[in-house]
Image (cartoon, rainbow, N blue to C red):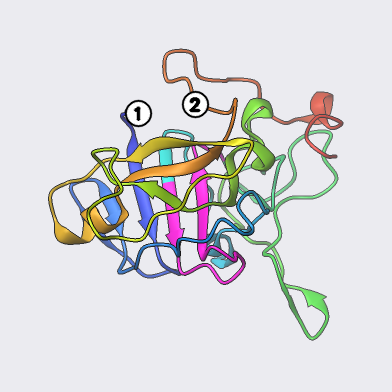
Amino acid sequence: MISSRLLITRGLLGLVASAILFTIAAPGCNSTQGVGDPCRPEREYDATFNGFDVNEVNVESKSYQCQTRLCLVNHFQGRVTCPFGQTPDGTANPGIDKPCVLPGTVDGKIVGNAANGKAVAANLVDRLPEKAVYCSCRCANADGSTDDGANYCECPDGFTCEQLVASIGSQFSQELSGGYCVKSGTKYNTGNPPTAVCNAASKAACGG
């Protein structure tokens, strides 16, 4: 099982427990329809949010972008909406056209600088959203079993059931701990973490 800081959210509310941020949530539905569809984590609608940490696993339950109702952020760095990051003063990194902007619009206009005054880390070339951020579903509990009466899914072709969220003993964590469907071949290697970031030299690889 991957040992990492875990982040489980529902919307933008949360509480801190033993260095793990949780919010009240229910398990994702047991359908596999839409597994692998892209999703934009709701935390990125927060203008003060400066990005995910590659050492975290984020399970966003009640995601209305996903047919499974669950958006998985599996060892991803930065913001989906800002692949090239930005400097601490809120400007674009060298060779990049623009800094981060808050997703969504007001009266047809883009809502201004999403993380003004904050540094936002660029995405990692080997952990782009298509590999690390997408709709998923819970396929097993923390023991790798599916016979405890909870709702689980069977991962579709091209996905494997991987243990991502460890239980901390509470009933709440048990409802979300365990395995999730991840794209085959995208398992995060804690012993050899990626280091190459999206920048002016890697625009093509990062969708720029």
Q: Nearer the viewer, residue 34 or 177?
A: 34
Q: Which residue is mark 1?
A: 2
Residue at 82% over, 39% down: 207
Look at label 1 and name its amino acid.
Answer: Ile
Q: Secondary structure at mark 1?
A: loop
Characterize the local packing of mark 1: few (<14), some (14-19) or many (20 or more) Cα atoms within 10 angstroms: some
> Is disc 1 in contact with disc 2, using a CB cutoff of under 8 Å?
yes
Characterize the local packing of mark 2: few (<14), some (14-19) or many (20 or more) Cα atoms within 10 angstroms: some
Residue at 52% over, 67% down: 63
Q: Quadrant of residue 127?
A: top right
Q: Residue furthest front?
A: 147
Q: Nearer the viewer, residue 179 or 42?
A: 179
Q: Secondary structure at mark 2?
A: loop
Q: Nearer the viewer, residue 193 or 66?
A: 66
Q: Quadrant of residue 4?
A: top left
Q: Which residues are magenta?
A: 58-77
Q: Which residue is mark 2?
A: 188
